[in-house]
Amino acid sequence: MRITVEDIARLAGVSKATVSRVINGNPTGVGEKTRERVQKIVDELNYQTNPFAKNYTPSHSKTIGLIIPDVTNPFFSELVKAIENFSSDNGYVVIFGNTNSSPEKESRYLSTFIAKKVDGIILTSSAKECLDSHHLLEKYRIPCILLDRTLPGMQYTAGVFADNQLATYRSCEMMLSHGAQKVVFLSGPMDISTAKERIEGYRAALEKYGIPFDESLIKYGTYSVESGYGAIMELEREGQRYDGVVAANDTMALGAIRALRELAYRIPEDVEVAGFDNIDYAQMCDPPLTTVQQPTIEMGRKAAQLLLDAIDGKPPKEKNVRLLPRLVIRKTTK
Ligand code: RIB
């Protein structure tokens, strides 16, 4: 399928007439910033420079595109490593893009990968819902594996996810079984499916123990150390008292532990803490962090395997692969 003026218009958020004026070198009435934005997308998608680009045909250069939200988070760097190892062992080169959790950057990477005619894409999305660039993947039938996070409305080849709800349920249930009465939940960004699934696991554990869901014990973070630290300080300012913290990922748990120690709470005697991911720092934390071991390497390898199979024309045996994480009990829980 050829990349059309309509595709460019949708990606640039302008009319088809504006795109035509820019392409034909007659940008009268088109603002400079708009012209630059249109031209950038036109160039990236290689629209007009190659008159023979009548169809999207992958380059078959054994190249795949990989989009990750935060390479500074050890969970993702481990995921990238697993994907790259498997792909290169099978003769593929990985072009990697870090989006800093920006849907706009995600779109730009998708457009660029399409323009570069990659053979397929692995996507860990930061978007709340499908954007135009995601629909281009569908339109040109570019194999796409969703990894770690679902994306409402996206037509994708296959997905590899962790069972976030069950894992968080088990983590919180373990804490409640020790007699914890008031457990704070540090959530990830609620636009993201892993955050939504984990808070449901927390809610289900409370229900099992007949503890009402109390919104004042929920803090919405950004999966960052800073947001975990800030959440605990905010709870302190609010005068909240609690005896457990379940964080939706390890970096927020590490930030929370730093704040709790600054506030002279004893861990786990005064407040138990549990994280999610089991990044390397979790075991080096003081005290070592109880957390959930994500099947990170298995997820990365499975996503790469599914993509390479799809590129070779082999359809996936199952659309969604959901892998079960496991609890790792250390010293931040009783
Ligand atoms: O640590 C970042 C979190 O975001 C991970 O738990 C991963 O599942 C992603 O969704």
Image: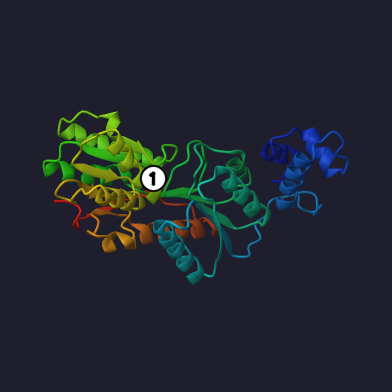
Q: Which residue is mark 1?
A: 227
Determine whether 132 is above or below 293 in the image. Answer: above
Judged left or right of residue 147, residue 239 is left
Determine whether 295 is above or below 33 in the image. Answer: below
Observer able to see residue 235:
yes
Residue ID at (84%, 38%): 21
**Residue type at mark 1?**
Ser
Label 1: which secondary element: helix
Observer able to see residue 224:
no
x and y percentages locating residue 257 in the rendered image? 28, 51
Quadrant of the rendered image containing residue 65? bottom right
x and y percentages locating residue 277 in the rendered image? 33, 54
Judged left or right of residue 307, residue 302 is left
Determine whether 179 is above or below 110 in the image. Answer: above
Viewer-closest of 15 and 323: 15
Residue ID at (24%, 44%): 245
x and y percentages locating residue 83 in the rendered image? 46, 62
Q: Judge the density around disc 1: few (<14), some (14-19), many (≥20) Cα neighbours within 10 Å.
A: many
Judged left or right of residue 171, residue 255 is right
